Amino acid sequence: MASSSSEAELKDKLLHRVGKKMETASLSPSQWSIYNVPQRLRKINETAYSPCIISVGPLHRNDGSLQVMEAYKYFYMQSIVERTQDPEKTKADICAAISSLEKEARANYAEKISHRDYELAEILLVDGCFILELFFRDRQPRLSERGVDPLIETEWMKGITDPEQTDSGPEPPESLSEYALHFFQPVLKFDDKLVKNNYGTNMHLLDLLRKCCGPSIPRKKPKSEDLMYVAGATKLKRAGIRLEPRQPHSTLSDMNFEDGVLAIPPLCVDDMTEPLFRNLIAFEQCHLDCEHKISSYASFMDSLINTPEDVELLEEKGIIKNYLGDSKSVSKLFNNLCKEIVVKPNFFQEQSEKIDEYYNSVYHRYKEILRSDYCPDPCRTIAFLAATTLLIISILQTVYTVAF
């Protein structure tokens, strides 16, 4: 009897606890757009996913090493508010606007946000104003009217922003997206024409950068979803495939293969390259129904670069500009980018199939051997043709003598 009572009591407690947690559980994956990087990716390079100067948003808000920069955010917020016609009304209006968006913003985070509603609203407000003012000052230096800007003028920020980009240009930015792309242009090093493109509605800045880097030309759906790898750059060259930098105004992923020529948009590789690509790839890996554009590009470059010699060849052709110092570092960077990721669909499957077919062609392989070994320059070409002609004449003469 006591046992039955104990079991009934346990059942009631369990039912109460589970029922309560089920009622409060809220999973809306379709709304998620901001994620904590999965541990399987983070463990490869922890520092690539963690802020080192300033925290934006609630995920790293409690990191003590980043607290010193919080004062700069309020400095920028004060600056942007004071430039309005009625600063007090502006403060009230932006506070009301953020308050109305707090629940929607919270729903965008895949991880549970522990901050209370007013705490999260404050983070969104201050960080939002900070980002806007940072973009404005990057394009319009005259906004730093209080003397030296404590943020823009620091040496580490000068390495990110471009001092040549000012508001004196003939076409000032017309949208927030343009301001953002101008700010990140020294890091991404894409063409000015891409800044003016319409990238539609973006979930956040990372999504905007991903669209800017992704293929501008729609790709055909691949015949197979199986990932196909191409041979390394030096092997492709030995098979007669020419490597060339693609014309300007193309995104990083706008590569093309036609008539034995592989055209790849130039890429500057520096200290910012790995963190940028890792975060773009992590977003594609986490977000539902997200096309793996950057993951496909990284996978293609990973297969193209297997050795430092591959990097040196790409440098020689003007496809890679190496600011890391040595070719081995670039090779290691790309070979580690695709660890622990899945690429489906592969945006370069069709190109990879064409390259593989050309690479495995016996005709093209021997044609390249003939060109590189026997006819590398005009003098040797003439000598080779003369020797071949003499050989043919000798053979014909011998045949004629034997026959007649």
Image (spheres, helix red, strand yellow):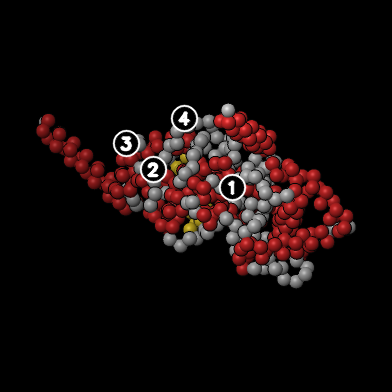
Please state which amino acid type lies under the numbered disc 2: Ala
Q: Residue at x 75, y 64 (%)?
A: 75
- Label 3, label 1: how far apart the Cα atoms are: 49 Å
**Image quadrant occupied by the C terminus:** top left
Q: Which is closer to the viewer, label 1 or label 2? A: 1
Q: Earlier in the sequence, mark 3 or mark 1?
A: 1
Disc on res. 36 = 1
Q: Quadrant of residue 18?
A: top right
Q: From the viewer's side, name the closer residue of 266 and 38.
A: 38
Q: Is residue 207 left or right of residue 275?
A: right
Q: Earlier in the sequence, mark 4 or mark 1?
A: 1
Q: Is residue 84 left or right of residue 222?
A: right
Residue farthest along the bottom direction in this orientation: 147
Where does label 4 land, which residue?
224
Where's residue 4, x and y in %?
Answer: 58, 28
Where's residue 28, x and y in %?
Answer: 66, 36
Q: Earlier in the sequence, mark 4 or mark 2?
A: 4
How busy is the neighbourhood of tag 2: few (under 14 within 10 Å), some, or many (20 plus)?
some
Where's residue 89, x and y in %?
Answer: 88, 55
Q: Which is closer to the viewer, label 4 or label 1? A: 1
- Label 4, label 1: how far apart the Cα atoms are: 31 Å
Where does label 3 land, which residue?
362
Where's residue 291, x and y in %?
Answer: 57, 37
Q: Residue at x 79, y 62 (%)?
A: 78
- Label 4, label 2: how far apart the Cα atoms are: 19 Å
Disc on res. 231 = 2
